[in-house]
């Protein structure tokens, strides 16, 4: 266990409500009219001690200094899940101090020690994947099967970086003169500030925390205030796994205040963010004053090109997966389907038929494949995109309106005859709407696909191998799925070009984002 300075211990004692491993009291008040599935799910979570409603600073489960809270509710039913602390600058400054005090001890552990603790964390995440999946469905809405899939994906980053921790190699560089020896050490960046989104409440956290911890960094995570419960549950398991207090801290609340404190601190040496391009630019700008290392995983506007020579069945399956995963709420979701003239009608018919088979509902219900959107504002954005497209001549093949389940639900939708003058061509819809654009030849397809400021994921369906190579090389994107709609995996480098971001997450390359190179030159080494 790390020892914090006396001042920090005093402040922590004053704000905390519970110590390590204890379940924080209060906060979880289920509404009386809660759906029975949700009640059963929350009971199981409570029994497992994974329904926590406090932030974590050091080894203390904390409330906001001024007692302010924010309510987390189930997007499918609107029911109350928890009141969590609404923290700001002061709590973040405390978390930074704690993370900074934990840094020397954590970074000086051997890589084998850090690897072992990460591995313990991975084991606990997998052991609790069912409960964590239920928690995620409750707070985020995605279908239970998809949520459990995300827990496994999230745990995969922890397992990968438990292994990669052992391979943080240095280098010896041949010197140009006999009297010198040149070496390169790779050392942790220092304290990291991570800001994560609501669409993947756990995977976007472990994708940052696991490489940071493997490298020897300590970290303060600000999860989305819409989905903080998965983050705190996972943090509890991290403590249980033996990761020392102060190494992983969770601060929940006011994004500008928390972000501001992270940016202004000279102790925070790295900012990592997943979210909108607009916020990413602000964080990049804010990092300039203290010249922090920055990695950004930002918005996308993914094209999916379907050529005449595609296998239609493969293309329909791939496009369906890439468009409707998480109800269209991922940065790598297809935003524009570009279909070649020759198969346009055939593809449109087959795709619309497949989409009409999707099952919308509460993610806890058996057989549901499409959950709600995160909130009514997300639905309003989808409505405005569809209205704009229809007003400019798009044809609705399936869906096209809010779902009868109400509030946060939108019907899985396919629009035909969409054109580049529509909003949906240039802005991420972040919902279950697939617009089908038409193109004549390969040149036009590549031009349309690249006609955007974004460059995250792209997809191509063709049976022609030389075309596949050519187009993959010509696409200005960080990732290309060839005859494949599901490209995300912890073992490959995930990230974008242009205004979709900086740096890569996952794979061996994801570790570099948390390491600095130090060049050491030994002089006067010639024999005496
Ligand atoms: C994202 O939407 O930011 C990430 C999606 C993924 O990892 O597949």
Image: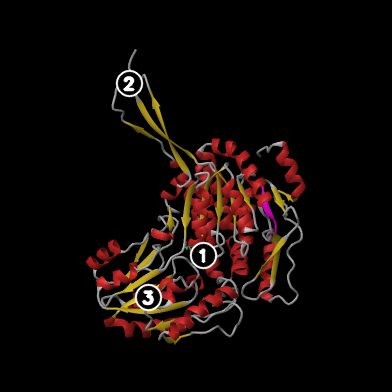
Q: CA distance from mark 1 to mark 2?
A: 56 Å
Locate the N terminus by quadrant.
Answer: top right
> Foreground residue, 81 or 242?
81
Identified at 46% across, 64% down, the residue is 299
Identity of the residue drawn at 65% across and 46% down: 93
Residue 37 in which image quadrant: bottom right
Label 1 crowd (10 A; few <14 / some 14-19 / many >=20): some
The answer to whether residue 461 shows anywhere in this view is no
Q: Which residues are magenta?
A: 52-57
The residue mark sitting in front, 3 or 1, is: 3
Q: Are marks 1 and 2 in contact (CB under 8 Å)?
A: no
User: In which quadrant is the C terminus drawn?
Assistant: top left
Q: Where is mark 1, residue-wise? A: 149
Choose mark 1 or mark 2, whichever is in front: 2
Is 277 inside the magenta-drawn segment? no
Residue 337, numbered circle: 3
Q: Is mark 2 within 8 Å of ligand 1?
A: no
User: Is residue 475 at all visible to an observer of this figure?
Assistant: yes
| Marked residue nearer the N-terminal end (1 or 2) | 1
Mark 3 or mark 2: name the one nearer the start of the chain: 2
Residue drawn at x 61%, y 43% is: 99
Give neighbour class at mark 2: few <14, some 14-19, many 20+ (Cα, 10 Å). few
Sequence-wise first label, 3 or 1: 1
Q: Position of residue 144 (x, y in %)?
A: 56, 70
Instruction: Indicate whether 210 appears above or below 101.
Output: below
Whole-Å distance between the Cαs marked 3 and 2? 61 Å
Residue where numbered disc 2 is placed: 179
Examine the image and state in which quarter residue 437 appears: bottom left
Image point (24%, 67%), residue name: 465
> Farthest residue toward the left?
466
Q: Secondary structure at mark 3?
A: strand
Question: Contact, CB < 8 Å: mark 3 with mark 1?
Answer: no
């Amino acid at each position: 266990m790390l020892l914090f300075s006396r001042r920090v211990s005093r402040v922590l004692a004053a704000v905390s409500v519970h110590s390590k491993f204890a379940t924080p009291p209060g906060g979880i008040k289920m509404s009386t009219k809660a759906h029975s599935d949700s009640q059963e799910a929350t009971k199981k979570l409570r029994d497992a001690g994974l329904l926590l409603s406090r932030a974590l600073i050091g080894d203390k489960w904390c409330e906001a200094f001024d007692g302010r809270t924010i309510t987390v509710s189930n997007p499918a039913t609107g029911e109350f899940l928890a009141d969590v602390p609404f923290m700001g600058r002061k709590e973040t400054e405390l978390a930074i101090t704690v993370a900074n005090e934990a840094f020397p001890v954590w970074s000086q552990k051997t890589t084998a020690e850090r690897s072992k603790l990460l591995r313990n964390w991975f084991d606990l995440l997998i052991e609790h994947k069912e409960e964590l999946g239920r928690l995620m469905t409750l707070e985020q809405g995605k279908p239970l099967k998809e949520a459990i899939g995300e827990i496994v994906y999230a745990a995969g980053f922890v397992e990968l970086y438990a292994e990669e921790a052992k391979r943080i190699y240095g280098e010896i560089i041949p010197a140009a003169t006999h009297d010198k020896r040149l070496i390169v050490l790779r050392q942790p960046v220092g304290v990291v500030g991570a800001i994560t989104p609501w669409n993947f409440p756990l995977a976007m956290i472990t994708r940052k925390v696991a490489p940071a911890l493997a490298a020897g960094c300590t970290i303060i995570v600000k999860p989305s205030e819409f989905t903080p419960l998965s983050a705190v549950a996972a943090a509890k398991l991290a403590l249980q796994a033996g990761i020392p207090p102060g190494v992983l801290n969770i601060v929940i609340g006011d994004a500008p205040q928390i972000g501001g404190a992270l940016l202004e601190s000279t102790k925070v040496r790295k900012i990592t963010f997943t979210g909108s391009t607009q916020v990413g630019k602000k964080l990049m700008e804010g990092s300039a004053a203290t010249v922090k290392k920055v990695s950004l995983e930002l918005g996308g506007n993914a094209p999916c090109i379907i050529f005449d020579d595609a296998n239609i069945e493969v293309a329909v399956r791939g496009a369906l997966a890439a468009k409707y995963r998480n109800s269209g709420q991922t940065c790598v979701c297809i935003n524009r389907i570009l279909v070649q003239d020759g198969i346009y009608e055939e593809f449109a018919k087959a795709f619309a038929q497949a989409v009409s088979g999707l099952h919308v509902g509460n993610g806890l219900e058996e057989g549901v494949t499409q959950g709600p959107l995160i909130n009514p504002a997300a639905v309003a954005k989808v409505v405005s995109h569809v209205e704009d497209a229809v007003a400019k001549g798009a044809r609705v093949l399936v869906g096209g309106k809010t779902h009868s389940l109400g509030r946060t639900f939108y019907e899985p939708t396919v629009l035909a005859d969409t054109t580049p003058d529509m909003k949906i061509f240039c802005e991420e819809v972040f919902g279950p709407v697939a617009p089908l654009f038409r193109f004549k030849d390969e040149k036009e397809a590549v031009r349309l696909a690249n006609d955007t400021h974004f460059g995250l994921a792209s997809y191509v369906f063709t049976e022609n191998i030389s075309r596949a190579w050519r187009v993959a090389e010509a696409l200005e994107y960080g990732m290309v799925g060839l005859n494949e709609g599901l490209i995300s995996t912890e073992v490959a480098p995930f990230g974008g070009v242009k205004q979709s971001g900086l740096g890569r997450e996952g794979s061996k390359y994801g570790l570099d984002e948390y390491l600095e190179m130090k060049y050491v030159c030994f002089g006067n080494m010639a024999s005496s």
